Amino acid sequence: MASKDPVYDEKTGAPKLVAESDSSNVETGGGTPERTLHRQLKNRHIAMISIGGVIGTGLFLGTANSLVAGGPVGLLLGYLTVGSICYSVMISLGEMIAYLPIPGGHIKLAERFVDGAFSFTMGWNYWYNWTIILPAELSAASVLVDFWDKNTDLNSLWISICIIVVVCINFLGAGAYGEAEFIFASIKVITIVGLIILGIILDLGGGPDHDRLGFRFWKDPGPFVQYHKIAGAKGRFLGWWAVMTQAAFSFIGTEIVAIAAGEAKNPRRNLPKAIRRVYIRILLFYIGGVTVIGLLVPSNDPNLGLNKGTAAASPFVIAIKRSGIKALPHIINACLLTSAWSAASSDMYTSSRALYGLAVAHNAPAIFKRTTRNGLPWVALLTSTAFSFLAFMGVSSGSGKVFNWFANMTAVAGLMTWFGIAVTYIRFYAGTKAQGLDRSKLPYSSVLQPYAAWYAAIFCLLISIFSGWAVFLKDNWDTATFVTNYLPLILFPILYIGAKLWKRSPIIPASEMDFYSGLAEIEAETYDEPPPRNRWEAFWQWLVCVLVLIFGPTSECAGLDVIMAVLCDTAFAYSMYTFLIVKYKINCCISGVPGRVLHSSTSAVCRWALGILLQLWLYDISDTAPASLRAFTLSVGYLRSPNGHWFLFLRRITQGTSKLPHASRKWSAHPCISRSWQFASVLN
């Protein structure tokens, strides 16, 4: 079939996604065009999906069991270890998926760089993983509703409502899913950031009881827990290992961005941005969160544990209750409910796309490749929806217990997915060496490779093998724990051996790997920002260049994002400090601040929440992280200054920027900056 030149949108300058009758559709043997997925997910969708895949009920609820198992230091070390594994997996996946952002994600990549049997195994394991976690998150949502309504007879009603909401979001298409996930992930991000800030305040004695905790609970009951009362270093080591097993469930989901690659706009530019910032989210949300938990809640608190069944088992809620704050647990529970809904929506999306990817790779019946005119894989989505009804098991067995069953199975299956991604990258790396492909010219690459991939593969396998070791201790056998921990581990080699015997596909030699099929179409969909169409857009670009001059150059000029990042960073810090001053009477003199902004703590909270949302939106979407972070730091420095004025704020910015290697100390004499000082002096 003859190829055609790409058609460009007249407004944006971006390549247009052709309709089903256009040349991009795959023709079947009879000449009938076959509908495929459409690229509907924007940069901000991809950014928030990568965030939403990280933050879930595992962080808000699952950390309770981890704290009991390992203690505060064991909890922190366990999450640091799994976080490093997660980052190693993501940079491995990012290099491959940024180069070849194809439908099916890492499932299809395994077919190119390992063999067909391995792709078959990874695909079905991944589909099983996200199909099983779907009823777990729905059960979690039902449990959270019980926080307000203790009538367990209505569990089936709440589960039904949750299923309807999740199904509606997914059947509206990838664009609607992206918008919903953007909103849900924003709520989750605001929640965890707010909880971390609140936790620091409570630890320093800013709560109603004014009890300064410090590192009290690191001393009593202690930094580690003797796991199952096993004495000595052995018990502490086993506690740390148990935390890693449980932490894996919390981190599983970061690879969703690879599955979304087939529906992402301008994937060559947008996917690397999301991958690069994974480590920031790991450090901020998870490491920051578990550190605060270890400071606020003792590991022997009787309320800890998921078996309690409600959000009262969340370490954050326990900490808030211990400090004497009464109304906040209801707000946190509502946020946890949106987190469960968001996770369930992502589960259904990922499960359906994984099944679609299996069909595209000819590892599942072709019927699962069917899509609507808008690119919705409706058959795969209906199939995934059917498994959501497993959540009704919670009506008879208890939602909390069902959640634990499915969570154990998901953690091990997810670790095997990470293992498969790492193995695929090791083969990908060997292929680049054999074929002379310069990795430094790829859209994304890491200097840590291939060592990071080997590290991830080895640790994922070890954690999976020893995930349920505790059942072999004396008088500790539990059939449900054994099955849920080791069934996914056993299924992986069974699937691979069976597929190997069925397909008889040899491992692809490094010199014969396919690095180029579909590359021309992908490159045609990669585009830069269009040139200005009128004087207004030209003015904005000029203003961006001025701000880049002041705040330092970035790798991309993202238009209004550069301007708004600076303004919103300042507004974020300003409103946050205003809230702390009003609510907690913190002694901090802010000179030159209009008094009317301090009259209402409610308005301060609204500005604080909006500031966080705008800050994260701009930080994740634009490619202005250095300027954004620098402006935030300087704005905080301004607000803490006892003699802060706007012109001093501007002067501090220029002084901070002039210390950078690429800056000039003569910038302070720039006409634009001088006029800004004069204008600020008039305002003050």
Image (cartoon, grey):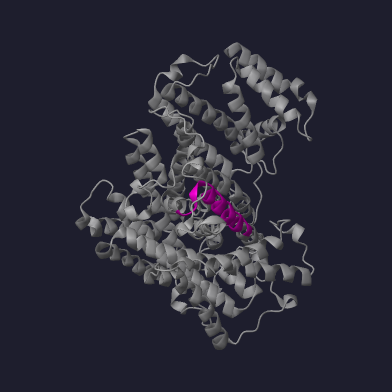
Q: Is residue 86 magenta?
A: yes
Residue occupying the point 58% across, 41% down: 619
In this rendering, the answer to whether 470 lies above or below 274 is below
Residue occupying the point 38% across, 34% down: 323
Quadrant for the C terminus, please.
Answer: top right
**Residue span colored magenta:** 69-88
Can residue 256 be spotted in the picture? yes
Residue 62 percent coordinates (x, y): 43, 53
Q: Nearer the viewer, residue 506 or 183?
A: 506
Q: Nearer the viewer, residue 385 or 536?
A: 385
Residue occupying the point 52% across, 19% down: 588
Quadrant for the N terminus, please.
Answer: bottom right
Q: Quadrant of residue 656?
A: top right
Residue 91 percent coordinates (x, y): 64, 57
Can residue 376 be spotted in the picture? no
- Please give left or right for residue 541 compared with residue 210 in the image: right
Q: Main secondary structure of the magenta part?
A: helix
- Please give left or right for residue 22 compared with residue 388 in the image: right
In this rendering, the answer to whether 581 lies above or below 77 is above
Residue occupying the point 40% across, 39% down: 319
Residue 266 percent coordinates (x, y): 60, 55
Q: Quadrant of residue 344?
A: bottom left
Residue 133 percent coordinates (x, y): 41, 63
Report the number of discs: 0
Q: Is residue 298 magenta?
A: no
Q: Residue furthest front?
A: 231
Q: Nearer the viewer, residue 174 or 323?
A: 323
Q: Nearer the viewer, residue 210 or 163?
A: 210
